[in-house]
Image (cartoon, grey):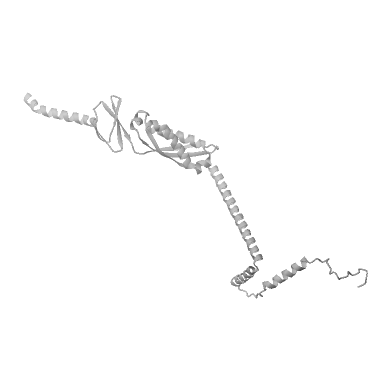
Amino acid sequence: MPEDLTLFEPFVWIITAAVLLAILLPQMVKILREYERAVVFRLGKFLSVKGPGFIILIPFIDRIERVDLRVLTINVERQEVITRDNVTVHVDAIVFFRVVDAEKAIIQVERYMEATTWLAQATLRSIVGQVELDELLAERETVNKKIQDIIDRQTDPWGIKVVSVEVRDVVLPEDMKRVMARQAETERDRRAKVIHAEGEFQAAARLVEAAQMMRDHPIALQLRYLQTMTDVSEEQNATFAFIPFPMELLEAFRSFGRGRGDANPGDASPGAVAPDPEEPA
């Protein structure tokens, strides 16, 4: 019987070594992807940042924390905020950030993902409360930039870089939507009236220029008269007879009228004798 145990003794050692290797190997060897880093702690004290690739650790003595260096996203839940002009809105946002210093992200803050999320929520409420509704709707990029700068400044000691912040949606109360719709309609009516008045003014100015041109150049009035005859003949089915009127004759009458108007009715020739009003006719 002892001889049988001696024969099985090498197999026992092989099995024992295989079991120990199966237990210790996962603790000794780690493989990190290209976008991962391992923050190594030895007996609780920071040792180094390793990776990517194949790394070797001391079992039960070294412990690692994996850090993802890719751009991560945080969905800031929709929350109710009062703007500076006392309008209640519901806003949500999304934050893009990445870890640039794995050591700080693990040592300087507990659960950097959760901490950045809470910071983004608080900053969103603070910035939206400092702007008016019109600025929030019309200058969205400015609001995003303000939120990004504040979060980036606060997370810099944590080894985190905020890439961008986007306010995704701004939900207004129903009464505010109706007020804004009426305001937009009124603004459109005002612009339409201004454009119409501007058109009338330009048309009147053109008519004045045309009248001055016809006054200075009578032949232009004759051409306009002929153009009107052509237009009427094309648009009407009835037959019209037009008698051309020479512009020279009209100018003669105008000159005669000016001459009569310039003469003084009280003036008399030197040889004329004023009639006696008492003599019978």
Left or right position of 46 against 273: left
Q: Position of residue 60 (x, y in %)?
A: 25, 26
Left or right position of 21 against 265: left
- Is residue 1 among the parts visible in the rendering? no
- Is residue 41 among the parts visible in the rendering? yes
**Is 226 situated above or below 122?**
below
Pick whichever, 10 or 250, lies toward us.
Answer: 250
Q: Quadrant of the N terminus?
A: top left
Left or right position of 182 against 246: left
Q: Position of residue 172 (x, y in %)?
A: 51, 42
Q: How many marks?
A: 0
Residue at the location (72% across, 71% down)?
253
Left or right position of 3 against 66: left
Q: Position of residue 54 (x, y in %)?
A: 24, 35
Residue at the location (72% across, 69% down)?
255
Residue located farthest toward the front when viewing the structure as drawn:
270
**Is 256 situated above or below 94?**
below
